[in-house]
Amino acid sequence: MLKKTLMSPDLARAARALSQVSAKNIADSAGMSKRQLHEYERGRQGLDEEELRRLRRTLEEFGIRFVPEDDDGGYGVRQKFNSRKVRALEQWEDEGGPAYDDDI
C-alpha cells in the first residue's frame, strides 16, 4: 500500500518532467486523458483519491520517488536511480545485444 503523500499539481508536473516521459504515456498508464492530466498539473481540475493514487503509482513505475516533507525541507520528487546506477543499468541492457520481442 502506498503511503499518503502530497500530490499537488506542481509536484505532479515536476515528477513528470523529471521522468522524461510524455504526458500521453503518463496519462494512459494512469487511466486518464492527457487533457485531464494537463488540467490537473495547471491547477484547473482536481483529481479524486483513486486518480491521485494511480497517477502516483504510474510516476513511480517510471522511476520517480516522492520525498515527504520533514524538518529539513519541503516535499519533492527525485529520480529512483542515481546517474551511476543508470549507466550500469544501460550497460547491462546492452550486453546481450539489441532486445527483440519474442514469444517466450
Image: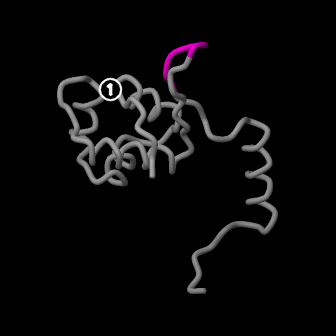
Check the image and report above or below for 12 versus 49.
above
Q: Residue 53 placed where, x, y %?
A: 35, 46
Q: Residue 6 placed where, x, y %?
A: 39, 29
Residue 67, picture quadrant: top right
Between 67 and 4, which is closer to the camera in this rendering? Answer: 4
Q: Residue at x 79, y 68 (%)?
A: 96
**Looking at the picture, which amino acid does disc 1 mark?**
Pro
For the stretch drawn in magenta, what is the main secondary structure?
A: loop
Q: Residue 51 placed where, x, y %?
A: 27, 46
Check the image and report above or below for 96 versus 18.
below
Residue that extends furthest to the top in the rendered view of this protein: 72
Residue 48, picture quadrant: top left
Check the image and report above or below for 38 versus 50.
above
Q: Residue at x 42, y 33 (%)?
A: 5
How packed mark 1 is, by other alpha carbons closer than 10 Å (few <14, some 14-19, many 20 or more), is many
The residue wearing badge 1 is 9
Q: Residue at x 54, y 39 (%)?
A: 64
Q: Is residue 27 part of the magenta span, yes or no?
A: no
Q: Residue 7 placed where, x, y %?
A: 37, 31
The region drawn magenta spans: 71-76
30 lies left or right of 95: left
91 lies left or right of 76: right
